[in-house]
Image (cartoon, rainbow, N blue to C red):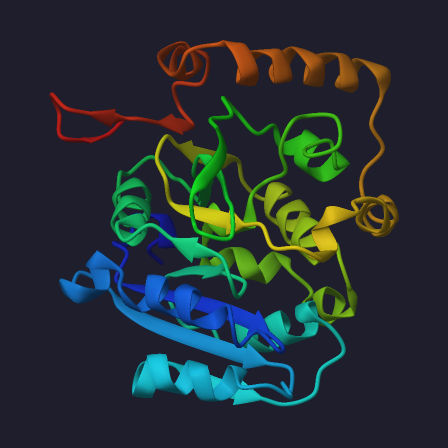
């Protein structure tokens, strides 16, 4: 049997879980449907909008933007992660991701992801630079991490003792990694379902980093993410225990993230940090 890591990327699945997101869904859907890799025919796209029985115009807006290019399901659910689990059960793409309403991808995101996954380096999942935008889509924060340590992912250190979380808006994975995920359990989370996903993936594979803009989180007033304490309480129930020396190493990593130039970061993580080479015309 040929490993999925040896097969070229031919298709993407993206899930958007949403409810009452009429003002937000258009930007997100357009950024997914407008991917250059899809428009060129390099990859095909399965786009799943999993709506939680919205009472506003979310479904109408999604249908207006997507037409027959998306599968739109609207039915009651208990949480965003229940909606996400429904979408992931239907995922058929070689590469899978999810993007919440209001957030967006760079037009070249799928091309960059496919390039790295097709590089022959055995990458199973990857993330890009950390990007945060305001409501107008203007960049207000960016950061290039130099590495994500698997045990730190499982311990819930990122975003709590280090400057950023593993950013959902810029993370993609090969579909076989979903075999490590209990989708029923994912559906039971209200806040920390993303952490549960990353923890499952980190038990199987290293997280690669691509030094480019793949996607962005967009800040909006009143977002649940403004208060991290309920998220941490849910995460604490499933994270692995960390020790004092883990936190000491995390402080070192954080200092590197914030102070070291990107080329030096590459030298510190040659295998899992990909940067564009003008000379070779590829991600290395």
Quadrant position of the N terminus in the picture: bottom left
Name which quarter of the figure residue 184 lies in.
bottom right
Name which quarter of the figure residue 283 lies in.
top left
Q: Position of residue 168 (x, y in %)?
A: 55, 50
Q: Position of residue 39 (x, y in %)?
A: 17, 65
Circle count: 0
Q: Nearer the viewer, residue 193 or 173?
A: 193
Name which quarter of the figure residue 273 lies in.
top left
Q: Residue at x 43, y 38 (%)?
A: 128
Quadrant position of the C terminus in the picture: top left
Does 241 sit above or below residue 191? above
Q: Residue at x 60, y 55 (%)?
A: 220
Q: Residue at x 66, y 55 (%)?
A: 221
Q: Nearer the viewer, residue 99 or 101?
A: 101
Does 129 sit above or below residue 63? above
Left or right: 210 as drawn, with respect to 220:
left
Left or right: 192 as drawn, with respect to 217:
right
Q: Position of residue 133 (x, y in %)?
A: 49, 44
Q: Position of residue 226 (x, y in %)?
A: 73, 48
Q: Residue at x 51, y 62 (%)?
A: 102
Does 177 sit above or below residue 159? below
Left or right: 241 as drawn, with respect to 47:
right
Q: Nearer the viewer, residue 91 or 231?
A: 231
């Amino acid at each position: 049997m040929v490993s999925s890591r040896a097969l070229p990327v031919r298709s993407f699945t993206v899930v958007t879980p949403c409810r009452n997101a009429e003002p937000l869904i258009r930007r997100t859907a357009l950024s997914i449907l407008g991917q250059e890799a899809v428009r060129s025919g390099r990859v095909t796209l399965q786009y799943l909008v999993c709506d939680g029985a919205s009472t506003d115009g979310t479904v109408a807006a999604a249908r207006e933007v997507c037409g027959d290019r998306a599968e739109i399901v609207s039915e009651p659910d208990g949480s965003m992660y229940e909606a996400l689990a429904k979408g992931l059960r239907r995922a058929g793409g070689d590469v899978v991701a999810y993007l919440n309403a209001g957030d967006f991808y760079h037009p070249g995101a799928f091309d960059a992801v496919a390039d790295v996954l097709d590089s022959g380096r055995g990458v199973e999942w990857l993330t890009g630079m950390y990007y945060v935008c305001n409501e107008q889509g203007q960049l207000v924060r960016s950061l290039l991490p130099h590495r994500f340590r698997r045990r730190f992912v499982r311990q819930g250190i990122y975003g709590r003792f280090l400057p950023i979380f593993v950013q959902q808006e810029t993370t993609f994975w090969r579909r076989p990694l979903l075999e490590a995920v209990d989708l029923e359990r994912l559906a039971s989370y209200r806040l920390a379902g993303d952490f549960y996903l990353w923890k499952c993936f980190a038990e199987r594979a290293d997280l690669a980093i691509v030094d480019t803009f793949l996607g962005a989180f967009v800040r909006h007033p009143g977002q649940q993410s403004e208060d991290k304490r309920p998220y941490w309480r849910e995460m604490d129930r499933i994270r692995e225990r960390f020790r004092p020396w883990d936190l000491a190493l995390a402080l070192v990593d954080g200092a590197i993230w914030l102070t070291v130039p990107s080329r030096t970061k590459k030298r510190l993580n040659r295998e899992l940090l990909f940067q564009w080479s003008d000379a070779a015309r590829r991600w290395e």
